[in-house]
Image (cartoon, rainbow, N blue to C red):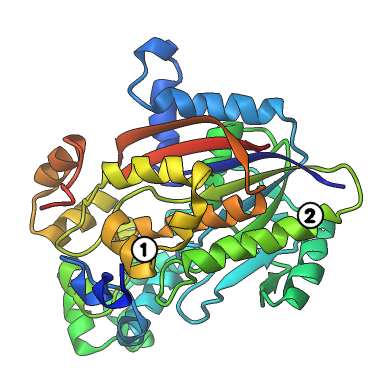
């Protein structure tokens, strides 16, 4: 296979490759999520989410997405899924709920798809 | 000289622990396809009586965040406590004892060779390390029967190290182990994968054909896997499945010629194709 025929990041369907551009865009959101590794910080987050987001200087768009737990939007705004799930866990939600929301499927549809062997690589 | 007694590639998805717990009480014949291999891998590994496990894994925003992203980290600590990943520290996971003598032996040889490792003398570890350790040594051990040298690889923020670079790092560590003075018995565990994707419209991606090919090639033709680009790993294995490059570090530490002991594969464990392979140096 020649270099020019090889798959590039932009050729991968349905995937937001987490590169430097996304990492810069999502830094505040991801650092806030990383803080939720501490029980004291989880309590602060639950007690006053707005103050918590202010402390980490989230953008207005990121704050709106966090308020509505719009996981797909958080991802589009630079959130990394390993960090976003910490928000879900602080809420008492489970990981499939986050992943399903990104695909537009209900949690039940997503879990059924996985039990049937997952999303087919050929669509 | 240190002896490398086992090479293992194994998934580290947290759901592997409850999956194996659900299969354990069943007779081997009643277990779902692929599950038996995980139990046999653990039994076989314990029979090899390793003193130390070199565990290649990635952190998932527990010890590290995007504030600082080292490409390759080697632990050189006396011990590695389990991290709080967001749901509290699991009290059933004992702290992992380290082997700083072995860590520094590797560091002192591999960095001068040109692999600029980051050295961590204080580090907590997350499910990327403890899920495979629980699968192989028991989910709730009173204490771990082996010391651990953790090697953490950035597989989350692109550009991540290429599969080729991971393979070559493994080869450099393998050369370092040849001059390790005493008869320490070392097992090498590469973790992560297999195919899965937890983000974007393609979330839920599973590529069983790629995974099964990978399980064979990691034993017989690792060069072929080392030739794949980061984009190809994401394309074939999914954005999170691309962490399979960490198995190449393990494979590089092993000899060029190895014998397969066993392998197994099960879909799905949560959102992941779960695989295991065990090999010995020929």
**Residue at 83% of width from left, 62% of height from top?**
B105
Q: Determine the secondary structure under disc 2.
A: helix
**Residue at 43% of width from left, 71% of height from top?**
A34
| Marks 2 and 1 close (CB-CB < 8 Å) | no
**Residue at 80% of width from left, 69% of height from top?**
B109
- B136 relative to A61, above or below: above
Residue A25: quadrant of the picture: bottom left
Mark 1 Cα shell of 10 Å, populated few (<14), some (14-19), many (≥20): many
Q: Chain of mark 2?
A: B
Mark 2 Cα shell of 10 Å, populated few (<14), some (14-19), many (≥20): many
For this view, does A52 lie left or right of residue B262? left
In the image, which is nearer the foreground, mark 2 or mark 1?
Answer: 2
Q: Chain of mark 1?
A: A
Q: CA distance from mark 2 to mark 1?
A: 34 Å
Q: Position of residue B211 (x, y in %)?
A: 35, 44
**Foreground of the two, A78 or B167:** B167
For this view, does B8 lie left or right of residue A62? right
Hey, which residue is sitting farthest front in the picture?
A: A2
* Residue pointed to by mark 1: A82
Marks 2 & 1 on one chain: no
Q: Which mark is residue B130?
A: none
* Residue pointed to by mark 2: B177
Q: Determine the secondary structure under disc 1.
A: helix
**Foreground of the two, B255 or A27:** B255
Q: Position of residue A4 (x, y in %)?
A: 27, 78
Residue A62: quadrant of the picture: bottom left
- B258 relative to B39, above or below: below
Hey, which residue is sitting farthest right in the picture?
A: B181
Q: Position of residue B227 (x, y in %)?
A: 44, 63
**Residue at 41% of width from left, 68% of height from top?**
B156
Q: Split into 4 quadrants, where in the image is the C terminus of chain B? A: top right
- B70 relative to B232, above or below: below
């Amino acid at each position: 296979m020649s270099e020019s025929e090889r798959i590039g990041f932009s050729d991968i369907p349905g995937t937001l490759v987490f590169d430097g551009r996304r990492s810069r865009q999502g830094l505040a959101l991801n650092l806030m999520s990383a803080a939720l590794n501490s029980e004291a910080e989880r309590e602060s987050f639950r007690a006053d989410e707005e103050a918590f987001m202010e402390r980490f200087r989230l953008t207005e768009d990121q704050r709106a997405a966090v308020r509505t737990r719009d996981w797909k939007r958080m991802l589009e705004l630079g959130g990394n899924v390993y960090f976003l799930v910490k928000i879900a866990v602080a809420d008492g939600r489970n990981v499939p709920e986050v992943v399903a929301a990104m695909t537009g499927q209900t949690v039940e549809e997503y879990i059924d798809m996985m039990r049937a062997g997952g999303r087919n690589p050929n669509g | 000289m240190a002896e490398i007694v086992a090479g293992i590639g194994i998934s580290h998805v947290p759901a592997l622990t409850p999956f194996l717990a659900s299969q354990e009480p069943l007779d081997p014949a009643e277990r779902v396809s692929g599950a038996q291999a995980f139990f046999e891998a653990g039994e076989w590994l314990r029979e090899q009586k390793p003193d130390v496990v070199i565990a290649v894994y990635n952190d998932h925003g527990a010890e590290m965040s995007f504030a600082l992203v080292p490409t390759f980290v080697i632990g050189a600590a006396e011990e590695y406590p389990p991290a709080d990943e967001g749901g509290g520290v699991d009290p059933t996971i004992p702290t992992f004892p380290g082997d700083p003598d072995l860590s520094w032996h590797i560091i002192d040889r591999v960095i001068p060779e040109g692999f600029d490792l980051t050295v961590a003398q204080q580090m907590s570890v997350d499910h990327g390390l403890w899920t495979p350790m629980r699968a192989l040594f028991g989910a709730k051990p009173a204490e771990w029967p082996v010391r651990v040298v953790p090697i953490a690889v950035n597989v989350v923020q692109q550009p991540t190290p290429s599969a080729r670079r991971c393979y070559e790092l493994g080869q450099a560590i393998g050369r370092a182990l040849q001059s390790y003075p005493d008869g320490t018995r070392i097992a090498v565990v590469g973790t992560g994968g297999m195919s899965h994707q937890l983000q974007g419209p393609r979330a839920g991606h599973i590529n069983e054909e790629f995974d099964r090919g990978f399980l064979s090639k990691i034993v017989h033709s690792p060069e072929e896997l080392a030739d794949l680009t980061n984009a190809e790993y994401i394309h074939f294995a999914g954005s999170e499945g691309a962490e399979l490059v960490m198995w190449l570090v393990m494979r590089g530490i092993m000899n060029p010629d190895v014998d397969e002991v066993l392998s197994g594969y099960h879909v799905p464990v949560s959102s992941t194709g779960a695989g295991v392979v065990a090999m010995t140096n020929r």
